[in-house]
Image (tube, rainbow, N blue to C red):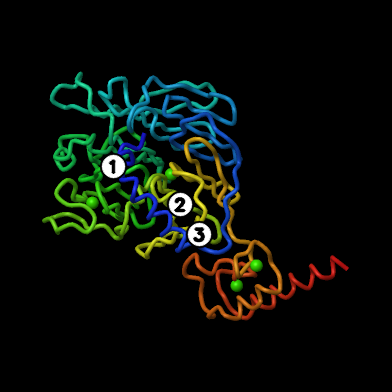
Amino acid sequence: MRGQVKKVLFLVVVWVVVAVKARALPGFRVEKVGDLVPFVSSIAVDSKGQVYYATTSGKIIRGAQTVATVDTDAMGNSGLIGMALESDDSAVVHYTTLNQTADVIARIDLGTGQETVIHEFVCDIEVPSRGSNPEHHGGNPIVAPDGSIFVAIGDYGSFAIAAKPEWNAGKVFRIRPDGSVEQFARGFRNPFDMAWDAANERLFIPDNGDANDDEINIIQAGAFCGWPFTMGNGPDVDGAVKPVYVWPSIVAPTGVVAPANRLMKGGYLIATFVGKTIFFVKDDSTPVSLIDAPVGSIVDVAETPDGRILFTTGLALYELVMPKPGDCNGDGLVNAQDLDALDREPAGKTTDARNWGCDANADGFINADDRISLLHVIAGRVRAVR
Ligand SMILES: [Ca+2]
Ligand SMILES: [Ca+2]
Ligand SMILES: [Ca+2]
Ligand SMILES: [Ca+2]
């Protein structure tokens, strides 16, 4: 699992954790929801709040019930490596066949467990029966509002073929609702997840570098993203789209979600395996780390219909609890000390995750109204105690 991650330098991990702590945000905290059947590669939540998870060994699980099992074997970055919900009745999964001869995209009926293959991406186009390297096969598919399925496949550790249009490795594909398959973009090393911005017809897609060059790309159809000729802040390559952001150290981006909740709408959350945190980023601004006390390497993140953020380490499910409105100093309480913190906060629109707790009336702005709102909350508490 997460092949890129395996070769990561352990010395770097220590440094990353320290750096993440230093950038931590007030008001967020992590709560464990429960242990999962390992190893979980993907989580998704339906419109009723029911959590689904997929295991690398091939199970699609709802709560404690196995809904379906696909024929795969978990090794390296292979197995059942991704899942997305199309509706409360059907999921789309991404898995590798035995011996990694193909990346399969299939639909799972969540009522009956029946599997219908949508498309098979052959790994070795020269000798299709020959298996590929189990590393770098990608991860979660996503489902766009028009019903298109996007799926990313990594370079199988084979470098050159990621740029060659005729190979399936190192590509993002768009599968239209009629089943037609388009190569959407090429030149990726190993992207695990993405989000489709339908209004702007563009794809938000991090990619895992081979050194300090993990990147975020925002691309349109036809983009060439540079691998294996360049990565991160490497040299310009003719025709290659540059990433909008490159992390200064290895984070190993995994799950992505575009949340709809009030605080995060319009931005993206990116889980990280080596960074052990979740980053929030809006457009091409610098990502902000939201977890200061890591619980482990994170493999996927999802939002519930009521706007809560769930994530998994592959072994357990956690909630990233967001700041309470009014908890301006981020200590988990809403009280008079938050008034002092609010008075130190420059008035203006909330533009990033740093001052979310100060937005006491939850209208998206920091101004005098929040002081009035906060005073009401504090006064209400005092009356209730008396
Ligand atoms: Ca790139
Ligand atoms: Ca996702
Ligand atoms: Ca507080
Ligand atoms: Ca406000």
Determine the CA span between mark 2 and mark 3: 16 Å
Query: Sequence order check: which comes first, mark 3 or mark 1?
Result: 1
Left or right of 130? Residue 176 is right
Which of discs 3 and 1 lies nearer the camera? The answer is: 1
- Name the residue rendered at 21%, 44% in the picture: 186
Amino acid type assigned to the residue bearing label 3 in the image: Met
Q: Position of residue 235 (x, y in %)?
A: 14, 58
Q: Quadrant of the N terminus?
A: top left
Residue furthest to the front in view is: 11
> Disc 3 on helix, strand or loop?
loop
Amino acid type assigned to the residue bearing label 1 in the image: Asn
Of the numbered discs in the image, which one, if any, rests on residue 53?
none
Determine the CA span between mark 3 and mark 1: 26 Å
Query: Sequence order check: which comes first, mark 1 or mark 2?
Result: 1
Which residue is tagged 1?
A: 190
Which residue is tagged 3?
A: 264
Of the numbered discs in the image, which one, if any, rests on residue 277?
2
158 or 187: nearer the viewer: 158
Count neighbours of disc 1 (C-alpha within 10 A) and say few if under 14, some if 14 to 19, many if 20 or more. Answer: many
Q: Position of residue 115 (x, y in %)?
A: 43, 22
Count neighbours of disc 3 (C-alpha within 10 A) and say few if under 14, some if 14 to 19, many if 20 or more. Answer: some
Query: Sequence order check: which comes first, mark 2 or mark 3?
Result: 3
Task: Name the image quarter holding residue 160.
Answer: top left
- Name the residue rendered at 54%, 37% in the picture: 316
